[in-house]
Image (cartoon, rainbow, N blue to C red):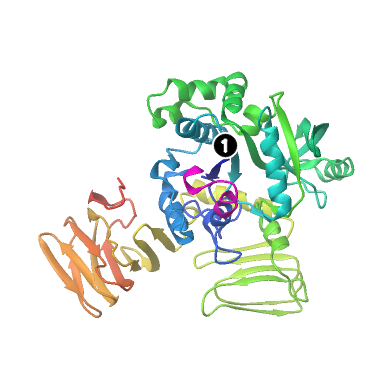
């Protein structure tokens, strides 16, 4: 079995915890592993590393590679497919399926979203083996038995039973249902509908034929394109559910009787986290963070500093280093409206946290004002920034930890803790960590424009433009 992991989603519904350049599949808000890493571990139950393919956004390439590196999993470079732009799930899946078939021929493929929390025990493995049998002739989806009426999920009405030697292994799909209102959701649960998990399994040949029939414009965009960029310019924005699954006569569903949560809202995160005796779900991070609750009940609190609540209940409090969200539980689906407003304003806080990760390490914005910005750069051992130049700003670097090799113009110097250098605007420069410990540098930028897009790269170890 081959595995196709979808890891291209943007961070909208969990703002400010997630951002466009750090979406929820890479945020470690439950433990020390990201949801993407947990998905890779599930894929390894059925696929070897060379049989795992990842479709992701170009902006996330190094997040994917870093997370894989932490797991000690090395995929062939050509197995990480970088979308030029997001076009929803059907184009992403079709591109991945075409790459699988090109590499291995007609194959069974499991399609796994990378931002779900799933208990992958015996029931999970049994469901996948049943789906593998059905995939010979069906496009299989996995249905979760509802634990309560839920208005945030799509539903599946199972049809006729599909038997094998060991008994019933699945059902035909009688109907897909959109997210319902509460009364309709209650009826669906009573009538044994299943939640639509967004996971699939099928033979590549069967899937391609169904795309040709039911989503011909999607197929033609890839068939007629000379490159992936061309295909993505031509392909319509369409989900696999709307484009194929709701139209095909070959849809089947396998019940998945295990814990599943798509973590699509802060209410979903509240459900997952452990609660204290007052029903508060708390996640603190940072050495100075803590939570004090006085007469406070049933709150979700995720904070990076000392936070106290007095006499409040049923609140969502998400406190990051540059933004604070306070909402009533039950209203968290509206967080995406906040995200939309900020994006319309061009606010960079929809894109990135104060700490931004790069393939060479990370930087944290410590302070900024008119014509200046102060950052802490963290460069991993053996890594270097691109050879670059800025038109609108000068920079002053002070080493606080480790040893820096610095190129400024035609000079190359070594700097140790307490030593510094100045880079005028318009001068080529580069920062490198030649040592074996993490390099930390305080960077002070001065200039009329301090945006991250004022970078002209002349050479880069990571293949960035």
Q: Which residue does the image show at 66% across and 41% down from the upper left?
A: 198
Report x, y in % for residue 387: 22, 55
Q: Which residue is mark 1?
A: 89
Residue 292 lies in quadrant: bottom right
Q: Is residue 197 left or right of residue 232?
A: right
- Give yes or no for residue 51 being in the magenta stretch: yes
**In the image: residue 454, left or right of residue 266:** left
| In-front residue for pair 366/408 | 408
Q: For the point 51% across and 54% down, which residue is it? A: 19
Q: Secondary structure at mark 1?
A: helix
Which residue appears farthest toward the front when viewing the image?
165
Q: How far across and how far down the image is residue 409, in percent?
A: 13, 59
Residue 62 position (above or below residue 367): above
The relative height of residue 109 versus residue 331 in the rendered view (above or below) is above
Q: Is residue 53 visible?
A: no
Q: Please state the horizontal and vertical placement of residue 432, each as a whole percent of the image.
A: 24, 64
Q: Residue at x 49, y 35 (%)?
A: 100
Is residue 402 covered in magenta?
Answer: no
Measuring from the top left, give residue 334's x and y in whole percent.
Answer: 66, 51
Depth check: give the residue in front, 182 or 50.
50
**Residue drawn at 29 percent across, 68 percent down:** 443
Q: Of 33 and 149, which appears nearest the observer?
A: 33
Q: Is residue 443 left or right of residue 106?
A: left
Q: Dot 1: few (<14), some (14–19), or many (≥20) neighbours within 10 Å?
A: many
Residue 378 in view: yes
Count of labels in the image: 1
Residue 370 sits in quarter: bottom left
Q: Nearer the viewer, residue 459 or 254?
A: 254
- The N terminus lies in which quarter of the figure? top right
Screen quadrant of the C terminus: top left
Q: Which residues are the magenta region?
A: 40-52
Q: Is residue 278 left or right of residue 374?
A: right
């Amino acid at each position: 079995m081959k595995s196709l992991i979808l890891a291209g989603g943007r961070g909208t519904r969990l703002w400010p915890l997630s951002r466009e350049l750090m979406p929820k599949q890479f945020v470690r808000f439950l433990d020390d592993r990201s949801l993407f890493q947990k998905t890779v571990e599930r894929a390894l139950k059925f696929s070897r590393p060379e049989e795992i393919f990842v479709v992701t956004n170009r902006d996330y390439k190094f997040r994917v590679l870093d997370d894989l590196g932490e797991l000690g999993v090395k995929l062939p470079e050509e197995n990480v497919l970088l979308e030029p732009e997001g076009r929803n799930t059907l184009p992403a899946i079709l591109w991945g399926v075409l790459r699988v078939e090109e590499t291995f021929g007609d194959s069974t493929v499991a399609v796994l979203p990378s931002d779900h929390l799933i208990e992958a025990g015996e029931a999970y493995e049994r469901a996948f083996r049943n789906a593998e049998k059905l995939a010979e002739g069906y496009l299989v989806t996995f249905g979760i038995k509802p634990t309560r009426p839920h208005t945030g999920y799509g539903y599946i009405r199972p049809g006729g039973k599909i038997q094998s030697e060991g008994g019933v292994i699945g059902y035909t799909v009688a109907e897909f249902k959109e997210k319902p209102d509460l009364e309709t959701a209650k009826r669906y649960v009573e009538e044994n509908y299943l939640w639509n998990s967004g996971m699939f399994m099928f033979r590549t040949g069967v899937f391609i034929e169904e795309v040709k029939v039911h989503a011909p414009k999607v197929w033609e965009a890839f068939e007629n394109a000379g490159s992936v960029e061309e295909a993505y310019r031509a392909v319509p924005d369409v989900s696999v559910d709307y484009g194929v699954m709701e139209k095909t006569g070959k849809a089947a569903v396998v019940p998945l009787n295990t814990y599943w949560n798509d973590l699509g809202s802060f209410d979903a995160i509240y459900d997952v986290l452990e609660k204290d005796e007052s029903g508060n779900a708390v996640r603190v991070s940072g050495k100075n963070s803590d939570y004090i609750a006085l007469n406070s009940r049933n709150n979700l609190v995720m904070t990076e500093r000392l936070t106290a609540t007095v006499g409040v209940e049923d609140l969502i409090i998400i406190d990051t280093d540059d933004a604070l969200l306070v909402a009533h539980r039950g209203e968290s689906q509206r967080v995406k409206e906040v995200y939309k407003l900020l994006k319309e304003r061009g606010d960079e806080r929809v894109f990135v946290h104060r700490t931004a990760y790069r393939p060479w390490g990370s930087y944290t914005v410590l302070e900024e004002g008119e014509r200046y910005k102060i950052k802490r750069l963290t460069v991993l051992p053996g890594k270097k920034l691109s050879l670059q130049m800025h038109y609108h700003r000068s920079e002053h670097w002070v080493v606080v930890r480790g040893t820096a090799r610095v190129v400024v113009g035609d000079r190359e110097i070594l700097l140790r803790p307490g030593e510094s250098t100045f880079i005028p605007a318009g001068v080529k420069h580069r920062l490198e960590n030649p040592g074996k410990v993490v390099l930390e540098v305080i960077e002070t930028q001065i200039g009329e424009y301090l945006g991250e897009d004022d970078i002209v790269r002349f050479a880069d170890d990571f293949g960035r433009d």
